[in-house]
Amino acid sequence: MTIEQPAFGQRVREIRRAQGLSQGDLAGTDLSPSYVSLVENGRRIPGTKIVRSLAERLGTTVEALSTVRRPPDRQAQRLDLVGRLVAARASQLTGDWPAARRQLEAVLAHADGSDQDPVRWEARWELATVLGRFDDPAPHEAALRRLLDDPMTRSAPVLYARVAVELAHLLRTGGRLSDAVRAAEDAVRVTAGLEPGRPERAQAHIVLLSACVDSGEWRRADELGAHLRAEVAPLPAGEVRAGALWAAAGAQYLAGDTDGALALLAEAETLIASTDGVRQRFRLARARTLLALTAGPLDEADALLARTRQAAALVDTASARTWLAVLETVGALRHGDPAGAAAQVAAIDPDMAGLSPLDRARCLLQVARAHRAGGRAAETEEFFKAAAAGYEQAGAFRLAMESWRELSAGARNAAEPDPHAVILP
């Protein structure tokens, strides 16, 4: 019988832990827990009698504990892990998120502790992405934070920025705006050394500007918007460039330049029209239409609303239908039709699944305006207060304050930009 340390001690520890035993349980009456610890750490080579005693208490054989394990074929291991990763990606393409989650967790179970760092990192990143498809944000956030602590992430600014941006998006949509700003600032800091034109650099600025607008830091957003417009030029055409223009448009409108903001949104929509992101196209169309209905030329706003109806029919989700009802309500109010607005309000469901806390508050605000136009004082106060409470819960305290101010003033000041009309990427 040959006892090779530290392999012998590692096997003893693995089996003991798998059976839920403590070192004291394994020591029994003839050994000490400290001796068991020394064996498990490879600092003692036990004699034959002790090996037999340990095997008996662990319910295994001496041979199983003492047989030398041959290192696996690294090439075969890598091919196996890559194959599992490819299978998980196939499940993602078909929308089978539970299967993709199981497959990625299996990849990580085999990759952790090996030297397959790139494969492990990709599996962790894709698992975090898949977890975002489920209703529970806690595992998604935990996966992203584990990735931020990964040595490979910390050594690569591009990878770190990718994860930090995703975390900022998650926190922002979850109504944790101050946390979202901090995560976005982290991403901007890390990408500062990247060359202009890198999408990660632009994405970091986009999510920071968006979080600043939502949290009411509009002066800072204006500065970030100017910086982002300078970042646009070297970006390739596509979703990132469209997102940069979209975010800059929101800041420009809040600074008082409605025409410039609508022009940027039109350019962004042209850029995104050729991409495969149907949902992202609808979100941008929704943002552009809402701003046009609020502050743009009426004929242009009506044309955009007609196009958004068609886009909503293609997306055909409960969220899309609710947002279309919101836009129809705003359109009816713009045309001075309180009865038409009241009819559309019935189709708005602020409590439906899939709406972020901020979007829910925005919907409630438009419902309140429709009730005010219809002369329903009690409902007006109820929905303004609900919108303000929703903004406060999300950390959008300035938007909450604007809601209270509009309620007490009896109407919105048409000469000022309407912050409730700004929806960013």
Image (tube, rainbow, N blue to C red):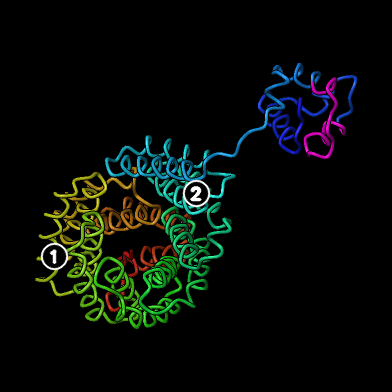
Residue 36: assigned label: none
Residue drawn 41% across and 47% down?
132
Image quadrant containing the N terminus: top right
- Which residue is most to the front? 1
Q: Where is residue 47 in the image (x, y as percent from the top left)?
A: 85, 26
Residue drawn 53% across and 48% down?
142
Q: In the picture provided, is 132 more to the left or to the right than 368?
A: right
Query: For this rendering, which residue is in front, 216 or 232?
Result: 232
Q: Is residue 379 above or below residue 11?
A: below
- Badge 2 is on which residue? 120
- Secondary structure type for disc 2: helix
Which of disc 1 and disc 2 is earlier in sequence? 2
The mark lying in front, picked from 2 and 1, is: 2
- Badge 1 is on which residue? 304
Task: Please tell me whether residue 36 belongs to the stretch shown in magenta.
Answer: yes
Q: In this view, does 353 lie above or below 149?
A: above
Task: Please tell me whether residue 413 belongs to the stretch shown in magenta.
Answer: no
Q: In the picture provided, is 35 more to the left or to the right than 340?
A: right
Q: Which amino acid does label 2 sit on?
A: Arg
Measured Cα–Cα span from mark 2 to mark 1: 46 Å
Q: Which amino acid does label 1 sit on?
A: Leu
Q: Where is residue 374 in the image (x, y as percent from the top left)?
A: 21, 56
**Which residues make up the magenta segment?**
34-51
Instruction: Kindly check if marks 2 and 1 are in contact, taking CB atoms under 8 A apart as contact.
Output: no
- Secondary structure type for disc 1: helix
